[in-house]
Image (cartoon, rainbow, N blue to C red):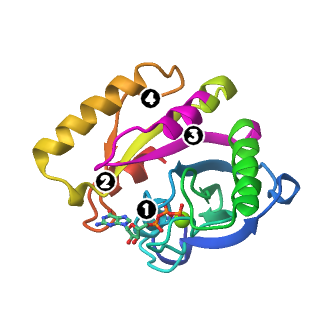
């Protein structure tokens, strides 16, 4: 017990949260996965834990609409967040969950690190910079995780990485190292597990 950190039933769904007063106690170390809708947050949690259906993933942007808590061993929470940016949902609904997202990212004491996911095909967009600035001003350290690396050619990937590094240099709360991943191929997962 406790030795298989990420594997099998050592990671489990706890609850979906729709308001700040629904958050669980802050007695565990918490890391969250933030990023634009459809960037691959839920897929990454599934890949990390080796459980395909743990977090619900889909091709429809706006799939995750609550703050979803997963327990990891006895000590950690993995937190799957709703996406920001475009989403396939009614505007009032989007506004409600965007507000919750911002409250969470700026006001969760036990949040040790945010992983900000960036699509390897698209790089850092204006909405990403907005979220990163929120993390800067809330003193939440964050690390960028590049997703869907399997979808780009090597030379295009390098160009995007340069753009991301340039963007990160303007954010004091950012760790300079990028983690390049593919949930599909399993790339970068050991690195990310070690970081968590
Ligand atoms: P929201 O909950 O809507 O914000 O999206 P999300 O960020 O949780 O994205 P999700 O994990 O649902 O994935 C979106 C789509 O991208 C799905 O169709 C996934 O199968 C696909 N996808 C995610 N990661 C990868 C990857 O590493 N490689 C490839 N090729 N596709 C991926
Ligand atoms: Mg999701």
Give the crowd class for mark 2: few <14, some 14-19, many >=20 residues within 10 Å. Answer: many
Tell whether 114 sits left or right of 18: left
Question: Does the closest atom of ligand 1 sit within 8 Å of the Cβ of label 2?
Answer: yes
Q: Is residue 165 left or right of residue 17?
A: left
Quarter holding residue 56: bottom right
Circle 2 sits in a helix, a strand or a loop, which is it? loop
Q: Can I make out residue 4 in this image?
A: no
Q: Which residue is mark 4?
A: 175
Q: In this picture, which residue range is highlighted in magenta?
A: 107-133
Residue at 39%, 50% (x, y): give it: 192
Give the residue drawn at x 29%, y 68%.
184
- Contact, CB < 8 Å: mark 3 with mark 4? no
Q: Residue at x 66, y 42 (%)?
A: 111
The numbered mark, 4 or 2, whose residue comes first in the sequence reads: 4
Ligand 1 sits in which quadrant?
bottom left
Label 4 element class: loop
- Whether residues under marks 1 and 2 lie with C-beta atoms below 8 angstroms apart, the answer is yes
Label at residue 143: none
Q: Position of residue 142 (x, y in %)?
A: 52, 35
* Marks 1 and 2, how far apart at CA: 9 Å
SS label for mark 3:
strand
Q: Which residue is mark 1?
A: 44
Tag nearer the camera, 3 or 2: 2
Mark 4 neighbour density, 10 Å: few (under 14) some (14–19) many (20 or more): some
> Which residue is the site of mark 3?
113
Front residue of 114 and 154: 154
Is the residue indicated by label 1 positioned so its CB lies within 8 Å of ligand 1? yes
| Inter-mark Cα distance, 4 to 2 | 16 Å
To which residue does mark 2 refer? 181
């Amino acid at each position: 017990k406790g030795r298989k950190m990420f594997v099998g039933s050592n990671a489990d769904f706890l609850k979906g949260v729709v308001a700040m007063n629904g958050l669980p106690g802050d007695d565990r170390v918490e890391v969250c996965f933030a990023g634009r809708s459809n960037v691959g947050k839920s897929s990454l949690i599934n890949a990390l834990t080796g459980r395909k259906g743990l977090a619900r993933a889909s091709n429809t942007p706006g799939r995750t609409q609550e703050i979803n808590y997963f327990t990891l061993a006895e000590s950690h929470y993995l937190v799957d967040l709703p996406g920001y940016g475009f989403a396939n949902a009614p505007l009032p609904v989007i506004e409600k969950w965007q507000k919750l997202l911002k409250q969470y990212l700026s006001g969760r004491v036990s949040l040790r690190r945010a992983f900000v996911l960036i699509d390897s095909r698209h790089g850092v967009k204006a909405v990403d910079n907005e979220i990163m600035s929120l993390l800067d001003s809330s003193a939440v350290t964050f690390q960028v995780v590049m997703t869907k690396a399997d979808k780009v050619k090597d030379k295009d990937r390098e160009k995007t990485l340069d753009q991301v590094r340039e963007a990160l240099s303007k954010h004091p709360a950012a760790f300079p190292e990028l983690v390049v991943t593919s949930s599909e191929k399993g790339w970068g997962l050991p690195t990310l597990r070690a970081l968590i």
